[in-house]
Amino acid sequence: AEARAALAVAQAQLEQARQLPEQHKLRRAMQRAAVRAADNRLTAARHALAHKELLAGSRLLSSQEVAAAAEQVKELEAAKDVEAKKLAELELHDPQPDVRRAEAEVALLQARLQQAEQALAEHTLRAPRDGTVVRILVSPGEVLALPARQAAVIFAANEPRLIRAEVEQEFASRVAPGMAVRVQDDTDARVSCNGKVTLVSDWYMQRR
């Protein structure tokens, strides 16, 4: 669950990172517009200063007003310089490494999630196919040594039953795959079922 949560966070961050290139493009366009606006204001202020200097030369304007216009030009020059440096900073920044970093983080957390899922699967007892647990031969807390002397669980699959019958060697040659058989309970002859031979072993051993 922790691995899934971490992956979900990384995927959300990746989605945000993939928006960065377009956002960066828009910010650069806005900053270029800001630089042009600052340049236009500076140009207007310089024209105004030149006009006031002409008026001051004709004694139609005071020197204080000319000085104020000159200070305004300096202020707008500084403002334009700030906007230009902001644009230069945006031009230098490339958002693609941030996207690749987010993609790598997602890939890493996907691998960790797969490892966690594999570890969980290795610690989960699963039947090989659909069926029924007939008997559990262990108790909670019991330690099983390998190889185990007996099975921990007796399981019956939802498929035709396979019954192993031991045949004396002198009669084994009479048994062949495909032969019809009838199986009866040793203790109750009324319990029986029909079937056929599916496999005959090719070796003989002591009776189990």
Image: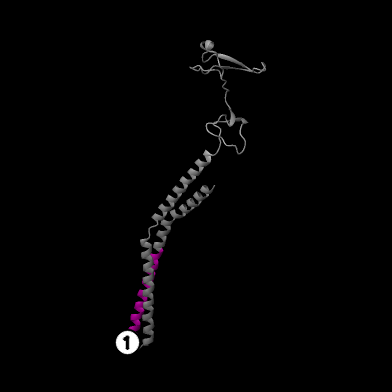
Image location of residue 83, percent across then percent down: 38, 69
Q: Residues within 10 Å of mark 1 (few under 14, many from 20)?
A: few
Quadrant of res 163: top right
Quadrant of res 129: top right
Dot 1: element: helix
Q: Nearer the viewer, residue 131 or 31?
A: 131
Say above or below: 161 vs 24. Answer: above
> In this figure, which colouring scheme has been used for the structure?
one colour
Say above or below: 61 vs 118. Answer: below
Q: Which residue corresponds to the image point at 38% horizontal and 75% vertical from the top-left?
A: 76
For residue 114, side relative to residue 31 (left or right): right
Q: Which residue corresponds to the image point at 37% horizontal and 68% vertical from the top-left?
A: 85
Residue bearing the label numbered 1: 57
Image location of residue 140, percent across then percent down: 62, 38
Q: Is residue 9 magenta?
A: no
Image location of residue 203, percent across then percent down: 49, 17
Image location of residue 66, percent across then percent down: 36, 84
Residues in magenta, as a range? 30-57
Q: Which residue corresponds to the image point at 46% horizontal and 55% vertical from the top-left?
A: 16
For residue 85, side relative to residue 14 (left or right): left
Residue 98 seen anywhere in this rendered image of the structure:
yes
Q: Nearer the viewer, residue 102 or 111?
A: 111
Given the image, on which type of amino acid does mark 1 rest? Gly
Quadrant of res 49: bottom left
**Magenta-highlighted stretch: main secondary structure?**
helix
Residue 61 seen anywhere in this rendered image of the structure:
no
For residue 137, side relative to residue 85 (left or right): right
Q: Nearer the viewer, residue 20 or 193?
A: 193
For residue 158, side relative to residue 69 (left or right): right
Count how many numbered circles sit on residues in the image. Answer: 1
